[in-house]
Structure formats: structure tokens, C-alpha cells
Image: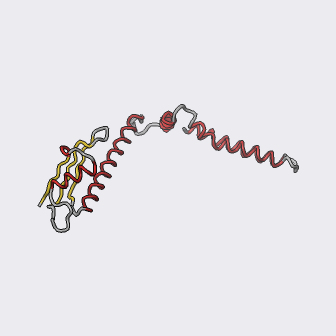
């Protein structure tokens, strides 16, 4: 990685020296703007060349792997795409669970049901295996849902989760 950076810097310095030399040598004619256009194209290609080299590999994953390999030792641990993918999937799953919990809590609060805690268990395919909702004792005053069975039915109808996978615990 450092050698790539060194080569890029030396290319940029050579281009700078070349441009300065061309500016001194070029006569003041109408060709000057065309020559500067050509020099601009060469400069842009030189500046963009690391990005082009980055994407020359067959896939973006190969490119990322090559860059990570060039970075050097990562604290004695080898970085591999499977670990990155696994961490990514874990983070997505965790975010999905948190979003689902927040949505269930918000919808139940709209029905005047106070939620203490929600636990969600997902399969690897993001199917809900179990959802456990811990609620405060349902208050009949102003509540559109007035018992535990209605909470279970409401969650079933809103999220299309099988009744056997829904547990509602009511605390006093």
C-alpha cells in the first residue's frame, strides 16, 4: 500500500515538473489551449489512477481484500471476507430486532398498552421464532385493548406471527 502511495506521489511530482516545463516552452499560439487540455487529461488520469487500479480486480470484494491485505497486519488477526460478512449479518440482525421491538412498543402504546420489555428470537432467515412481550397490567380506562388475549391477537394481526410464537406476560 505504501509503495502504491509512493508511486502515485512520484507520478504527481513528475506531472508537476512536466507541466511547468511545458508552460515555459510552449509558444503563445492558438495551440496553447489544446496542449493545456491534453495536459489536463493526463493529470486527471494520474490523479484517478489509484481508483482505477482499485477497481481493476474482478469484483469489489477482491478489491477490498487486496486493499486490506496491503494495509498490513491487523493486530495479528487475519482479515477475511467471511468474518466481515458474518459481522455485517449480525449487525443487520441486531438492527432488525431493535426496529421490530420499537415498532411493537409504539403500536401497543397507541392502543394504551404500556410495554415493559420485549424479547425477540429470530432464525438465520429472519423468521420470528418467538416474541415475548412483557406489559404492565392492562388498564381498562382508555385502553382499546383490555386483556392479554387481545394483545396476542393484535400482534398476530399486525405482524402475521403465529399465535404459538407470541408470549405476553402481564405484570401488576
Residue pictured at 58% horizontal, 34% vertical: 56
94, 106: nearer the viewer: 106
Q: How is the image coloured?
A: secondary structure
Q: The C terminus lies in which quarter of the figure?
A: bottom left
The image position of residue 121, as x and y in percent, is 24, 44
Residue pictured at 26% horizontal, 43% vertical: 128
Q: The N terminus lies in which quarter of the figure?
A: top right
Residue 42 sits in quarter: top right
Q: In the drawing, does residue 26 fall left or right of residue 105?
A: right
The image position of residue 76, as x and y in percent, is 39, 36
Residue pictured at 56% horizontal, 37% vertical: 55
Q: Seen from this angle, which residue lies furthest left?
A: 172
Q: In the drawing, does residue 6 fall left or right of residue 16?
A: left
85, 7: nearer the viewer: 85
Q: In the drawing, does residue 121 fall left or right of residue 96?
A: left
49, 76: nearer the viewer: 49
Q: Seen from this angle, which residue lies furthest bottom?
A: 141
The image position of residue 31, as x and y in percent, is 85, 46
37, 136: nearer the viewer: 136
Q: In the drawing, does residue 166 fall left or right of residue 38?
A: left
The image position of residue 101, as x and y in percent, is 28, 53
Amino acid at each position: 500500500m505504501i509503495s502504491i502511495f509512493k508511486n502515485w506521489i512520484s507520478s504527481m511530482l513528475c506531472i508537476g515538473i512536466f507541466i511547468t516545463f511545458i508552460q515555459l516552452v510552449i509558444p503563445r499560439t492558438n495551440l496553447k489551449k489544446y496542449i493545456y487540455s491534453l495536459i489536463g487529461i493526463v493529470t486527471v488520469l494520474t490523479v484517478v489512477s489509484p481508483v482505477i487500479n482499485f477497481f481493476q480486480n474482478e469484483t469489489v470484494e477482491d478489491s477490498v481484500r487486496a486493499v486490506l491485505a496491503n494495509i498490513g497486519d491487523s493486530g495479528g488477526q487475519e482479515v477475511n471476507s467471511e468474518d466481515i460478512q458474518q459481522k455485517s449479518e449480525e449487525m443487520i440482525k441486531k438492527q432488525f430486532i431493535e426496529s421490530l421491538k420499537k415498532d411493537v412498543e409504539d403500536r401497543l402504546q397507541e392502543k394504551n398498552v404500556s410495554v415493559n420489555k420485549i424479547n425477540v428470537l429470530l432464525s438465520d432467515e429472519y423468521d420470528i421464532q418467538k416474541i415475548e412481550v412483557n406489559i404492565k397490567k392492562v388498564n381498562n380506562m382508555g385502553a382499546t385493548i383490555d386483556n392479554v388475549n387481545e394483545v396476542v391477537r393484535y400482534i398476530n394481526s399486525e405482524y402475521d406471527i403465529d399465535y404459538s410464537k407470541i408470549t405476553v406476560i402481564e405484570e401488576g
